[in-house]
Image: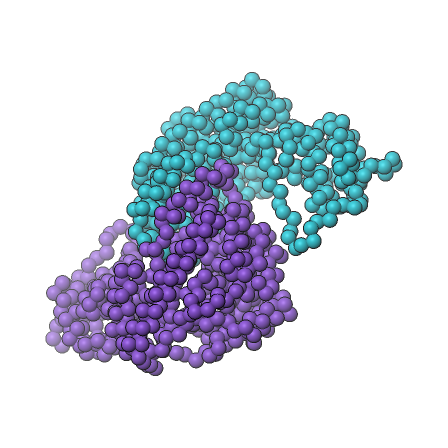
Chain colours: A purple, B cyan
């Protein structure tokens, strides 16, 4: 029983639909009954037990139960406790699977998405008009698997200037997001006979899963107080890293460790996959150049418009070692799979300088948000330690040991969506576990930012 | 030696860069030397032999050789014939692989691409502005793996009205082209344990290859004078068909054979993959409705904007049996991989009626082209039999037996790019081989159409 309630808790965390605790719990329980996750006749835990498990007041649970009994979803009888009603509402008779509910939290602090409300729509449409008017009609046909040459050319110049990447348009390949790029690289590595790939102890589960589906076993590197420790790299085919800004811990890869990674790659022929997801956003010092500049023959540089502009564009890029280009293009199916119009528009957006202007303005906005966040935490949550704030648009909030679970539950009741650090921890991580939150400060639109910070401070110990 | 010249011939066929025969041959030979396909010192065949092999005048070959000797690419000495010069130009010393040459033929009659010069740019940009202005900012985030709901809703209504598809937006999934969709279905079938898939004896090699890469063996169905014969379907997991307009033969699947396919699917639980690539373009009678309408639980309907608008949009759609939706969405990686802006724009383009207007105008244009082509062939090439002209924008030209090779070579020298029927024939096809061309009449822009038809008539027997 405890396990099923923990699961329910996770569902609530992901999809809270109300703002108050009572309302949130009532909605979540109703939803669980309606969709059949709680079967008719199931006995619910006592209000005391559930309240303790969720870290909320017993009266709140009792009130939520009473609401649902009144609505007919639950039944309450002396001696048999509270149960899911037997005449549970039948799902519609058609074959439509139950629609996934996309209830939005009041404040979304899950990291990974930039401020979409600030997407430069007018500038983008202007660039689209210019690009589309200038393009030859042949551009609308089936294209080069590497993507449009206009975009590859614009990116080569931009990445060289801003990130120190040594890029030739011939070796750039456009993909629908970094994850699509990783899928291609994974397929190529596997086809070459690779079996293992080193990853960081903290990172994106989705990326590890893509590599896993490609048939590669992910082996985490140790993570210490200085960040990822590449010293144990041996016979892996490749290593996936976030050198400029470890995700989600926020540290850059230290100078001597950068060198060690490149040395390993040269010595063994291994490939370095450099995920430079938010390299443009750095606040307190000079940007850290791309590792790729150290050895373009051993490093695949992966960048994306998902953080600098919007994930919905589905545009990312890889700068490949020359020897990999053909294989990756072949893995892509030999044709371009990204829309030409957005590629032409992004090329125009970059070469016209609009991209630089947008990045500068976004950098200022995120920096202001970060400063508000750090100040508010210092004032209202002195026991919370903030790290990883020199770059990007997320921070790691270390919590007093043992408080993580209750903070997450309280956040759910407050309508705050956020992730714990454990969400980003590899199952075989070589790192001491840590009670912590990963708080993204990109997503809330400007008008909601103050409210989001206040709500966050309310749930912290 | 003969083999290497045949290969060279194929290269010329694909990438002729000049208009005249002599120019075309000269360019092709120069290119072969420059890129190293013809190594230094290689002895070339005599002008008489090459002329006979290519079906052109001996003087033309002699002139081309003389040009290249003058340019220093070849050497000619009494007694040792014509050879590739020893001091062959060294490729640049950097690691850049030789750039693929994309020389364009004068007239492109390869089927599969619509008239890109007629893409409705102004209307599209207007729709983009309207759609983009109306979209909530959240639309720019990571999206539903099925694609934007606005587009799925617009497509459900459109496909139901125009193609008789029974579609619910919940069961539609957007993909980057029909080939991307097939890749997903192939992965799902394989994961379910499927090993074989039936295909037509004629079709797209690229599609068979995708299924093959997914781990499915393609088994062709017999093809007779009435078209594809599905009577031999047995225990295959699925069958891939082009029921409305067999590609490239141009016949519709006959009524009783449509019924037989659906009966087979119901009896065995097999899946029908209905590739409806150009269902909108039908000239001489009522459009043939989609097979999917007969049984939405057994048929995957695949449609695309690649023929009706432009391949560069990289937008296609699948209407899936409800039971397949989750698996296919998962195979897509759980996130949307197509750009949101184009999806929103296409939705607006469809609902505003601009799509209907564009299709009507394109249909008229292709019909006029088809009529010109048929008239010209009747007049100038009476031995050529034209079929498959009731729909789409390609035709099959049956040639007198034994003439196919020389026609293709003559076409290459004329700067005409076209494909033979054998290019679309499955290696295990159950059909009598046929000397024929598949001529696409979508690609040339309007101003070039007359010239293209004249050039075609010149190379036909």
Residue B147: percent from left, percent from top:
37, 50
Residue A404: percent from left, percent from top:
32, 77
Tell me which residue sits at (30%, 59%) in the image.
A445
Instruction: From the viewer's side, name the closer residue of B84 and A125.
Output: A125
Residue A326 appears left or right of A376: right
Kindly give the residue lying farthest to the bottom in the view shown: A401
Instruction: From the viewer's side, name the closer residue of A19 and B438.
Output: A19
Residue A353 appears left or right of A18: right
* Image quadrant where residue A394 sits: bottom left
Task: Determine whether A246 is above or below B320 in the image.
Answer: below
* Image quadrant where residue A296 sits: bottom right
Q: Can residue A11 be seen at all in this image of the molecule? A: no
Residue A114: percent from left, percent from top:
37, 60
Q: Can residue A284 be seen at all in this image of the molecule? A: yes
Residue A177 appears left or right of B51: left
Tell me which residue sits at (38%, 70%) in the image.
A395
Residue A202: percent from left, percent from top:
44, 71
Task: Determine whether A284 is above or below B126 in the image.
Answer: below
Instruction: From the viewer's side, name the closer residue of A139 and A445.
Output: A445
* Image quadrant where residue B348 sits: top left
Picture mark count: 0
Tell me which residue sits at (11%, 75%) in the image.
A78
């Amino acid at each position: 029983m405890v396990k099923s309630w923990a699961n329910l808790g996770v569902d609530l965390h992901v999809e809270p639909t109300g703002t108050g605790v009572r309302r949130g719990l009532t909605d979540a329980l109703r939803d669980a009954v309606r969709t059949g996750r709680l079967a008719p006749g199931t006995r619910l835990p006592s209000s005391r037990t559930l309240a303790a498990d969720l870290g909320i007041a017993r009266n709140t649970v009792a009130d939520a139960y009473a609401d649902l009994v009144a609505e007919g979803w639950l039944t309450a009888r002396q001696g048999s406790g509270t149960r899911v009603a037997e005449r549970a509402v039948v799902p519609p008779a058609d074959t439509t699977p139950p629609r996934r509910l996309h209830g939005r939290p009041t404040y979304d602090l899950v990291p990974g998405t930039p401020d979409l409300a600030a997407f430069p729509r007018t500038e983008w449409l202007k660039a689209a008009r210019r690009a589309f008017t200038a393009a030859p009609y042949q551009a609308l046909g089936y294209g080069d698997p590497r993507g449009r040459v206009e975009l590859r050319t614009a990116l080569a110049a931009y990445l060289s200037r801003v990130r120190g990447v040594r890029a030739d348009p011939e070796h750039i390949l456009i993909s629908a997001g970094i994850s699509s790029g990783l899928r291609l690289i994974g397929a190529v590595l596997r086809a070459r006979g690779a079996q293992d790939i080193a990853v960081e102890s903290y990172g994106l589960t989705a990326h590890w899963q893509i590599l896993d589906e490609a048939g590669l076993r992910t082996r985490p590197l140790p993570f210490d107080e200085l960040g990822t420790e590449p010293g144990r790299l041996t016979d892996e085919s490749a290593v996936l890293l976030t050198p400029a800004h470890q995700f989600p811990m926020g540290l850059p890869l230290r100078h001597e460790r950068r060198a060690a990674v490149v040395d390993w790659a040269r010595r063994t022929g291994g490939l370095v996959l450099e995920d430079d997801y938010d390299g443009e956003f750095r606040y307190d010092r000079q940007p850290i150049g791309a590792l790729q500049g150290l050895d373009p023959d051993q490093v695949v540089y992966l960048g994306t418009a998902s953080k600098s502009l919007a994930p919905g564009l589905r545009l990312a890029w890889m700068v490949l070692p020359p020897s990999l280009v053909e294989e990756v293009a072949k893995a892509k199916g030999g044709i371009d799979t990204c829309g030409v119009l957005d590629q032409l528009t992004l090329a125009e957006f970059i070469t016209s300088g609009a991209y630089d202007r947008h990045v500068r303005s976004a950098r200022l906005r995120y920096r202001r948000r970060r400063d508000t966040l750090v100040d508010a935490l210092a004032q209202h949550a002195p026991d919370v330690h903030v790290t990883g704030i020199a770059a990007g648009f997320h921070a790691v909030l270390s919590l007093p040991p043992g408080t993580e679970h209750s903070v997450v539950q309280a956040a759910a009741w407050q309508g705050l969506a956020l992730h714990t650090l454990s969400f980003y921890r590899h199952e075989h991580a070589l790192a001491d576990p840590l009670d912590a939150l990963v708080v993204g400060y990109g997503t809330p639109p400007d008008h909601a930012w103050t409210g989001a910070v206040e709500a966050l401070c309310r749930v912290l110990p």
